[in-house]
Image (spheres, helix red, strand yellow):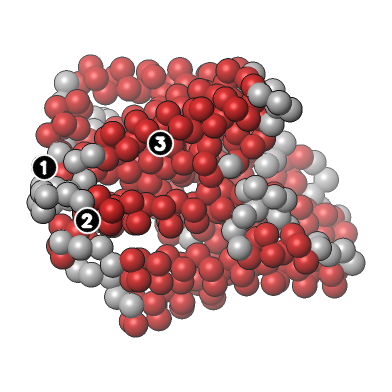
Amino acid sequence: MAVAAVMFRHSDVSAFLLRVGWIGVDLFFVLSGFLISGLLFSEYKKRHTISLKRFFIRRGLKIYPAFYVFLLLTGVMSYLVFHTHASLAHYLQDVFFIMNYTHGVWDHTWSLGVEEHFYIFLPILLLVLVRFSSDRRNPFAKIPWVAVAVRSLCIVFRAISVDFGTPNIKMAYVASHERMDALFFGVLLGYFYHFRPSVLEGLMCPRWNCAVIGAFFLFLLSFAYLFPLEEPSNMFATIGYTFIYLGFGGVLLLSLYVHGILPRGIGWVAEKIGSAFAFCGVYSYSIYLWHGPMGAWFPGLMRRAVHFPTSKFGNFAAYFMASFVIGITMSRLIEYPILHLRDRFFPQPQVVAVSPEVPEG
């Protein structure tokens, strides 16, 4: 769903989704923080340590092959078909994952830079906490305080970007040191989920709390519509992103703890829709990579070849379908064969990504 929102953002098929689709990146940040921290927390609960080597190798084999093949193939196609090419500097900025601080080859890959820096920061932080904690069962008790510090620093950094000197609202949106709080809010939820489940369970047990959280998310969605990315106020660029990820944290909690509330017929339809999203989610990384060039190239190539599409809805249909087809194809050709080799030579410890201590909601 996060990838789909960004794809709508990069199309003109819907004025509403064009204005609010950008928040799909924030949803992905919260989910990523929760899931990646969950892997590390589960490893610690199983082995009482965290292996940096294994983590970095496994993350690298997940991220780098698909991304570098993407850069290579799109570069070759740009040169052979469109007779254009990016500079070597732009490619190097992508190769070393600093494209969120300087302009890379493709605009949409900036979020990968934030993710990459998070993958470096988080396991080192957790190992430091393990090293200096006397509580072997739960050495991560200071994570709530770390989360407060990260959130406060990010707000300060965003305020500096938009309020001091030459305003740089784009930097407040894309820089790792100004967006890390969204990922770390997912880490905070992951910590409570794995080590203090009673906190989240107590929060989510009253049904009216769930209604409040849902209403809060709808409020934030309207908030994002009122302040689109192209026209943010300085106040929104400073603290608005904080409210957005808080709302998505609430959505994550609803998905974890609220079950069986839909009538049977509607629930069956929702289950099928969820299964379709889950199928696409398996390939979401490659779909995200390839939706950029598919949006830029594919509708035009189709018009040249078969004189279709000719409307904005036709353009969107061609772009959307091509993004999914090419993304899934490249995932099966590149991403998953590499992941199978990774799991063979660098297996993940026998851990669970979801805490067995949390009772079913």
Between 163 and 28, the one lying in front of the other is 163
Q: Crowding near pointer 3: few (<14 within 10 Å), some, many (20+)?
A: many
Q: Crowding near pointer 1: few (<14 within 10 Å), some, many (20+)?
A: few
Q: Are marks 2 and 1 in contact (CB under 8 Å)?
A: no
Residue type pointed to by label 2: Arg
Checking the image for residue 359, the label placed there is 1
Lower sequence index among marks 2 and 3: 2
For the C terminus, the image quarter is top left
| Residue beneath disc 3 | 150
Secondary structure of the residue carrying tag 3 is: helix
Whole-number angstrom distance, CA of label 2 to CA of label 1: 30 Å
What residue is at 58 percent from the left and 42 percent from the top? Answer: 175
Residue type pointed to by label 3: Val
The image shows residue 215, relative to residue 99, as above or below, that is above
Residue 161: which quarter of the image? top right
What residue is at 17 percent from the left and 49 percent from the top? Answer: 133
Whole-number angstrom distance, CA of label 2 to CA of label 3: 20 Å
Secondary structure of the residue carrying tag 1 is: loop
| Residue beneath disc 2 | 131
Whole-number angstrom distance, CA of label 1 to CA of label 3: 30 Å
